[in-house]
Amino acid sequence: MKSGFVSIVGRPNVGKSTLLNKLMNQKIAITSDKVGTTRNNIYGVYHEKDYQIIFVDTPGIQKERNKLGFLLNKKAYESFFNDLVLFIIDASTSFGPNDQKILDKLKKDEKEVILVLNKVDKLKKEQIIKEIEMVKDLYNFVAIVPISSLKGDNVKELLKVIKENLKDEVKYFDDETITNVSERFMVSEIIREKILNKTYDEIPHSVTVMLEKLEFKKEVVVVNALIIIDKANIRKIIIGKNGSMLKAIGQAAREELELYFNKKVYLELFVKTIENWQDREKVLKELGLTELDE
């Protein structure tokens, strides 16, 4: 058996979590087009007869504006110690300073890197060739693989390249393990995903979700969750006119949770303001933002 830990790194919004879900052929991590969506190193354990690949989805590396930002970058950089790194860039935009910063760190650590050009479905064939030419000499990459994580284009080829570069011969997890996230964590993340997908750009760093109750009854799953925001004006956005936004968030979350549990879900959402919660270490720990890696 060949195995190994494979980090998925890159700046925000390049499609890291979408790629993890596509590689795993199921939803492991939430996705949105907002910066700051992923907040933990999330494992997806891929099983095949002769292979076990532990994919590690990481927060997008970005400018640190508070303790939360510092924590997210710390988690992402910790994953650089894994055997193999998938460095994801958005091929539909220019290779920028944030990409270069990540690459410089990878160079310094002399990591084995597969460069993944994502979102090539937005480009013509000649543009893809041009993009490869522009980046191929930036580092001694193990391989350069153009893909579309959203559509699944060339993902099988990427998986083949990964398998060819696995070096361990250890079975790290049993066949039933597919991720390191708990049900409680996944429930809170699904709710947060619906908030991100239904609100504005300023919301991601301003909101988090804390699960207060997860109870399994005979015919229903009871969920009580606290939506925590850092400013009163954000509260207005989350609740909406006559509660319309909170209702929409709750409906979307409930529908996905019922698919997740294959059971009827009774969901109650509450909103609480904790000013500057992103800079309060005690609050960050209480919210469980560090628990997956500790």
Image (cartoon, grey):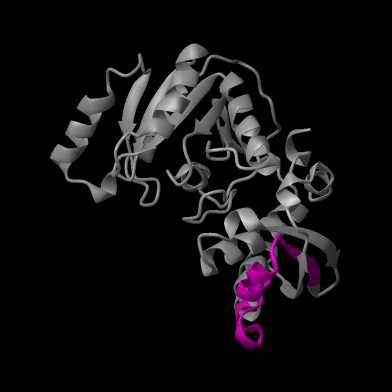
Q: Position of residue 171 (x, y in %)?
A: 66, 23
**Where, by quadrant of the figure, is residue 257 drawn?**
bottom right
- Taking the spot 44% from the left edge, 45% from the top edge, the residue there is 15
Q: Tell me which residue sits at (64%, 70%) in the image.
A: 233
Residue interval drawn in magenta: 221-245
Quick one: 68 or 164, which is closer to the camera? 68
Residue 57 part of the magenta segment:
no
Residue 172 visible within the image: yes
- x, y percent for residue 110: 48, 11
Query: In the image, 242: left or right of 156?
Result: right
Does 202 sit above or below residue 63? below
Q: Nearer the viewer, residue 147 or 50?
A: 147
Front position in the image: 12 or 116: 12
Would you identify the image quadrant in which residue 214 lies? bottom right
Q: Is residue 171 above or below residue 261?
A: above
The residue at the point 64 percent across, 72 percent down is 238
Residue 107 screen position, x and y as percent = 45, 15
Q: Residue at x 52, y 64 (%)?
A: 197
Count of numbered tags: 0
Q: Residue furthest bottom?
A: 242
223 in relation to 12, above or below:
below
Residue 106 in picture, x, y percent from top left: 48, 19
- Residue 1 seen: no
Residue sitting nearer the eye, 256 or 72:
72
Quadrant in which the C terminus is drawn: top right
Q: The N terminus is located in which quarter?
A: top right
User: For residue 236: magenta?
Assistant: yes
